Image: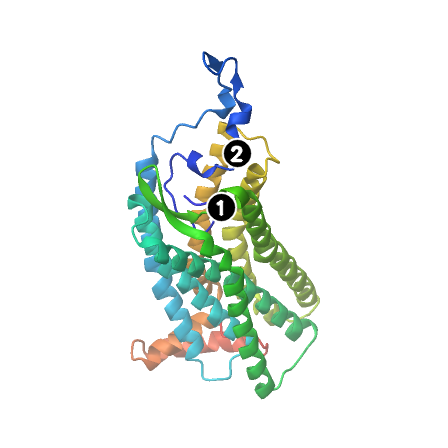
Amino acid sequence: MMTDPNTSYLFGDFGDFYDGFNISEELNYTDITENFTVNPLTQSCEPSTFASAVNIATCVFYVLICLLAIPGNLIVGLVIGSKRRVLSASDVYLFHLMMADILLALCLPFYATSVVRGWVFGDVMCKLISILTEVSFYSSILFLVCISVDRYQVIVCAMEVRKGKWRVGSCVICLSVWGLGVMLSLPALYNEAFPVSGLMMCSEHYDTESSDEWRLATRVLRHLLGFLLPLAAMLGCYGVTLARLLRTNGFKRQRAMRVIVAVVAGFLLCWSPYHVALMADTLLRTKALLHNCRTRMAVDVALFATQNLARLHCCVNPVLYAFVGQKFRSNLTELLYRKGVLERASVSRSSRSTSQMSDHPSTVL
């Protein structure tokens, strides 16, 4: 699989992607014209005997994620958009988070095809799909930061924003997040379709002389702006917010944070393992870790597994809303009633259970 969310190659022999290592310096030559002894640590790794089965399973996995993510997130969007009141800032950020998840889901069929047949969509589509994947990734975590800051302002600082001022501010923030996501995704323009072991692959393809520097720079950017700094902001805001809620006497206020905390926890559980594996790959490429066949294969397998887990995230949020969000279930029931799917009795029972939480300025979910 891929060392980055915007790359694609088969689960098998990964040696072609380690062109940055100077293998020749580690060969123990006795006589260049006669015999020489090869250091076993520098020999190429054997590809996995289960590569074909793993690739097919991954293809099916991506298709299932896409089929779950698109309708699930569309339902979330309908629930948020159909609410008969002015949406809070967190509602708007959750709506844009849903759009980012759909964007990633739409890219999965391309990756599913490339897993079994190689990249058959050409160089332009390689760059486009890579950029869209990166935009989805960066936008998701930035909108989660926006939600955490909004909850901190409303609950801890007790800030009330005028409707007119809030609408302008939220539009500016959302446009800024998408714009920043696009800017941070520009390194994906270096992704190209090129042949590897007889198949076309879509992967980062830097100039040989500066490949190490470019790769290190993009990795540091991804680690800092795509994970570590947003994570620190979210943990700081939610740590203070939850501490404030725990000091309150009302249980209703604490319940109002359950969906938001679940969304952040789902993001971290899906993406944290991938970033740990990616950091290990960065250290391996910069020779901070000992490079040998066993280490390289372990990191490649970790990247393959954790990246699949990360892509699962685009269908996680609707599941969290359905099981954790009592308001989401009530709003969905009301929406289905308006469409003529459910009877009024079901809506009345759901509304009574949700009205117990109405005293808190929380989200519609």
Pointer 1 residue = 207
Give me the residue at 53% from left, 64% from top.
Answer: 183
Q: Where residue 324 appears, x then y in whole percent?
A: 48, 63
User: Does residue 94 appear to the left or right of 159 in the view shown?
Assistant: left
Give me the residue at 45% from left, 62% from top.
Answer: 317
User: Does residue 75 appear to the left or right of 221 in the view shown?
Assistant: left
- Residue 73: quarter of image: bottom left
Would you place residue 6 above or below residue 301 in this image? below
Pointer 2 residue = 21
Would you place residue 174 above or below residue 200 in this image? below
Q: Rounded to the nearest whole Å, what is the CA distance between mark 2 and mark 1?
A: 14 Å
- The kind of residue tagged 1 is Asp
Q: Where residue 208 appears, x then y in whole percent?
A: 49, 42
Instruction: Check disc 1 and report its element: helix, strand or loop.
Output: loop
Of the numbered discs 2 and 1, the one sitting upstream in the chain is: 2
Estimate how packed mark 2 is, as few (under 14), some (14 to 19) or many (20 or more) residues with alpha carbons within 10 Å: some
In the image shown, does 137 or 220 lie closer to the viewer?
Answer: 220
Q: Can residue 88 be spotted in the picture?
A: no
- Residue 318: quarter of image: bottom left
In the image shown, does 27 or 3 lie closer to the viewer?
Answer: 27
Give me the residue at 64% from left, 59% from top.
Answer: 235
Count of marks placed on residues: 2
Q: Quadrant of the N terminus?
A: top left
